[in-house]
Amino acid sequence: MPARSPAPHGLVWFKSSYSGANTTECVECAYVTHGVLIRDSKDADGSVVAVGAGAWESFVGGLRQEQPAALT
């Protein structure tokens, strides 16, 4: 999971639809050929984390699974 700085320009960044109006604690993602880039929405010119496509798919799949009642 390498970090790079700064983020490449010309990317289409997006936030989760669950982030709502709260703009103070969000991350943004951008799809790239090899996977996804992730950055802090408050620091758009700061460092980004590159995540491979397989790791991103596993991460999102885990988030979509139903959480046990004790963790919600």
Image (cartoon, rainbow, N blue to C red):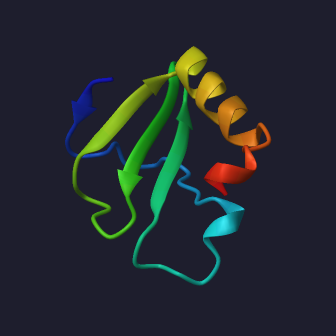
Residue 26 horizontal/vertical position (percent): 46, 65
Residue 36 horizontal/vertical position (percent): 51, 33
Relative side of 52 to 6, left or right: right
The residue sitting at the bottom extreme is 21
The residue at 71%/30% (across/down) is 61
- The quadrant in which residue 2 appears is top left
Residue 18, compared with residue 6, is above or below; it is below
Residue 30 horizontal/vertical position (percent): 53, 44
Quarter of the image where the C terminus is located: bottom right
- The quadrant in which residue 38 appears is top left
Q: How many marks on residues?
A: 0
Residue 13, compared with residue 32, is above or below; it is below
Quarter of the image where the N terminus is located: top left
Residue 46, compared with residue 61, is above or below; it is below
The residue at 48%/55% (across/down) is 28
Viewer-closest of 52 and 63:
63
Viewer-closest of 10 and 19:
19
Residue 34, compared with residue 63, is above or below; it is above
